[in-house]
Amino acid sequence: MLGLIQDRPLLIQQLIEHAALNHSDTEIVSRTLEGGIHRYTYGDAHLRAKKVAEALLALGIKAGDRIGTLAWNGYRHFELYYGISGMGAVCHTINPRLFPEQIVYIVNHAEDQLLFVDLNLLPVVEKLLPQFKTVRHVVAMTDRAHLPKDLGIPNLLVYEELLADQPGRYDWPVFDERTASSLCYTSGTTGNPKGVLYSHRSTILHAYAAALPDTLNLSARSVVLPVVPMFHVNAWGLPYSAALAGAKLVFPGVALDGASLHELFEQEGVTFTAGVPTVWLALLQHMQANKLKLSTLKYAVIGGSAAPPAMIETFDRDYGVEVLHAWGMTEMSPLGSVNHPKAKHLKLSREELLDVRLKQGRPAFGVEMKIVGDGGKELPRDGKAFGDLMVRGPWVTRGYFKGEGGEIVDQDGWFATGDVATLDPDGYMQITDRSKDVIKSGGEWISSIDLENAAMAHPAVAEAAVIGIHHPKWDERPLLIVHRKPGAKLDKDEMIAFLGIKVAKWWLPDDVQFVEAIPHTATGKILKTRLREDFRDYKLPTG
Amino acid sequence: MLGLIQDRPLLIQQLIEHAALNHSDTEIVSRTLEGGIHRYTYGDAHLRAKKVAEALLALGIKAGDRIGTLAWNGYRHFELYYGISGMGAVCHTINPRLFPEQIVYIVNHAEDQLLFVDLNLLPVVEKLLPQFKTVRHVVAMTDRAHLPKDLGIPNLLVYEELLADQPGRYDWPVFDERTASSLCYTSGTTGNPKGVLYSHRSTILHAYAAALPDTLNLSARSVVLPVVPMFHVNAWGLPYSAALAGAKLVFPGVALDGASLHELFEQEGVTFTAGVPTVWLALLQHMQANKLKLSTLKYAVIGGSAAPPAMIETFDRDYGVEVLHAWGMTEMSPLGSVNHPKAKHLKLSREELLDVRLKQGRPAFGVEMKIVGDGGKELPRDGKAFGDLMVRGPWVTRGYFKGEGGEIVDQDGWFATGDVATLDPDGYMQITDRSKDVIKSGGEWISSIDLENAAMAHPAVAEAAVIGIHHPKWDERPLLIVHRKPGAKLDKDEMIAFLGIKVAKWWLPDDVQFVEAIPHTATGKILKTRLREDFRDYKLPTG
């Protein structure tokens, strides 16, 4: 027997409609590429999102068509989010920082019909355009006055002219809530990028969960500045959850340096921001160097990689900002988990609470998590056992666009995140490693990250990396690779002795190798694939 | 084209599973009918909810069967919420305060198979049992030791014995999220009660929306005491949204007097409570008389009827408690709207803010509201125009159980609430009247409540009521009926003159009639149907 409740589908266009009706004068502020600050309201944005939809229809765009965007965080990008998805097409956000050949691959794989491009990215598109197979028009996200004169882009359209021609009287259509709404490619370390195709339903459910008090805690008193880009998993969903909550939005454009961000935080009364650790490092350095404070900021979400303990402490102690340590993935829309204390933690000292805050947080209702060991056996939630982190839920992907990568969920619907983690009895998850980096020794797992952190605590160590080396008896054993600080002295025995008081005996590396430098990825992570190559012919000493 | 996201249905059993996994030691505290306080955890509750499901299966209950409960707010009722709905049956909560013939009607109309009954309500059921046509077993919600000896209820079962027989290893089934989950009858003023049949989907979406910062603001730091009964629209959804947030729950049982509530608030560190104005009146009186304070309470939700301004002020000024003025209906699961300030209100003085707080709040995302005048024409959202309040959304009913009352939504899916309201440009809604009480004069509407409030501001008025009287030219004109304070002097001219400085001239009542008493409903509201009868033959003076 079914309930007798209205069959209202969950649709993205309802978010902007809700914001326009109930928060019509709430501001959306953008630092623009043309220069200066642009400000308007949810009411204005709604009208212009309708004009976007009308312009797309006029250009012959149909439901299901993919529309690419190459753009930073700004109000026109925001309008495209709603205008494209709201008329039934798919908003495909493209990371302009990808290698040119990746951009070409992605645009062609998605079969983008139109490309909306920010002013300073037009030269990139000009160069790649001959390789785009399906793009009918490029739309410059500016007005005629700011358009560079000598662009060699045929059929170029100008965003403000497109909108000026439209009446803005569009009635948003109502359709199946499972309809595809947006597309974002993950740039994995191997193989071609793979597309995650979100639905209206998944986006709305994620927006509800994201705005909850123990997730991002968004209300009509919040002022939200997403540093995380709108091409990076929809800026962690903030353009949706801010509209759901009626929060003021502040878009920083391309100026993500410490000085520009600090200025915007203070001028606009920002209470909430979100980004990766490197951005916050720059902000903290700028504030420390210039003796600045933050007068309105309450929450800084740190995701993308683990939040360093010192960063959590500094934000809290020196600036009165609560760090929300978070974890997610493109495949998860992206939230995951966010770290908020429970009632029982409120009695803890700041130091004791830091131990809780180092974890990546608790799953919002909707996300199911479990950890499994070899053979897929579920491991205990004791905060100690660590295993492959599996997730499931109504905003978790079930397969990549066009079936790339094949089956990616198991028969019970679990998706393997590629992370190794612990879960504790209070529901807090902590990432301990990447699945491909964990060392499997005699059926037990050793966390490479834990070993690296232990080694890096030694004053002579500049950087440390741990990889697994084949071992005839134990299958794999850890090799510690150390880059010493300039002039510092450290040998294998001292290093092992130092680790001996920090980790279990069977975790101790079988050997230590000293190197001149440790290779990194473009985003600063240790490039373990390269290290494994470098040490391919290395043999562990037999003891 | 559909998105590629997991098809996980939204199911109520996921809430208790989530709470048990992530908040296994968070407490659920109950004042029991047997005497004393019972405490256990979400982990314990989950195990026992599984045993409830197993017990139902053992009794031959199938998916879709209706299971009645006649019970107060306590942990066993909480287990039934999850055990019954989680196995696919329908949890039918029955208001024990209804007239016996209404209870009989409801149980038979719902075709309840089992009745779970609290200890002090067994005598009621004993008396009515011969009239119940479908009930196979009555289950006493207690243990054998506390069971009265001389009950004349054949086939009586004992709750704790039922559960003791079960292993608690039940795997919650996965089914269509639109499946009926629970049933609650509205006791309208006319006709038989009508059943609202909620679904798993509507309950989960409502739980997300209810926990949001601008709705009930629930987190794992909240301690929630629902005074609103679990038979009254699922205690406004709190047993669901508290589990979603991992909040501690405190169930007050039958002791809803000021002293008992205050004691529980303080002993359990309650931060959040919800109920109707009369409960809070008693609490405030008790605290004032005994010079008590509230050391942990932050939020008190007031719904059911309008929150008196003095109550909002007293809670805020004397006790540091923020009143969340709310509005909803059984037909809406029940939320509606909740009053929270916006960023721009934070600069207001306490007095200015009170004007905002008097409104019934803003709709949570998911609830659409509009107001319409005669002929269904939508009226402006200017905070002045008032019209019939219409609502729509994924937790609003589309028809009553078994089709009672016929079509209740229009062709666009709007449900007429029966309230008359204003909507302002900031999205705040304010109830100005009941649709059947508003006075339609010359095509314009006059709010009977506004006139009554204006009249009651006169020091000689004990109570005032306004009804519409037929008028040959204007269709209807207001008649003011006044009950003077003992010994007070007041005549028609003085009354009208007093009103003349408060309301528009064309709103002024055509006449004032003085009476010895104004009739009330059982819940203390003015009984206008009776007044209209009393004045059926009354003719307005011709001016």
Image: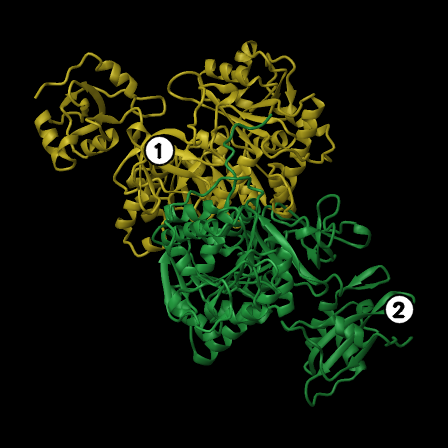
Chain colours: A green, B yellow
Q: Is residue B423 above or below residue A300?
A: above
In screen coordinates, is B348 left or right of A219?
A: left
Which numbered disc covers residue A168? none
Is residue A292 visible in this depiction of the protein? yes
x and y percent of residue A513 in the render?
Answer: 80, 80
In this orientation, which residue lies closer to the viewer: A319 or B248? A319
In this orientation, which residue lies closer to the viewer: B82 or A35? A35
Residue at coordinates 43% horizontally, 52% vertically from top-left? A49
Which numbered disc covers residue B389? 1
* Residue A324 location, quadrant: bottom right
- Quadrant that contains the C terminus of chain A: bottom right
Residue at coordinates 47% horizontally, 33% vertically from top-left? B396
Q: How many marks?
A: 2
In this orientation, which residue lies closer to the viewer: B179 or B342? B179
Q: Is residue A222 above or below residue A450?
A: above
Which numbered disc covers residue A471? 2
x and y percent of residue A236 in the render?
Answer: 55, 57
Crowd rating for badge 2 (residues with CA inside 10 Å; few <14, some 14–19, many 20+): some
Q: Residue furthest top?
A: B130
Pointer 2 chain? A
In screen coordinates, is A407 left or right of A199?
A: right
**Mark 1 residue type:** Leu
Residue at coordinates 80% horizontally, 74% vertically from top-left? A533
x and y percent of residue B258 in the render?
Answer: 40, 35
- Quadrant that contains the N terminus of chain A: top right
Residue at coordinates 52% horizontally, 75% vertically from top-left? A282
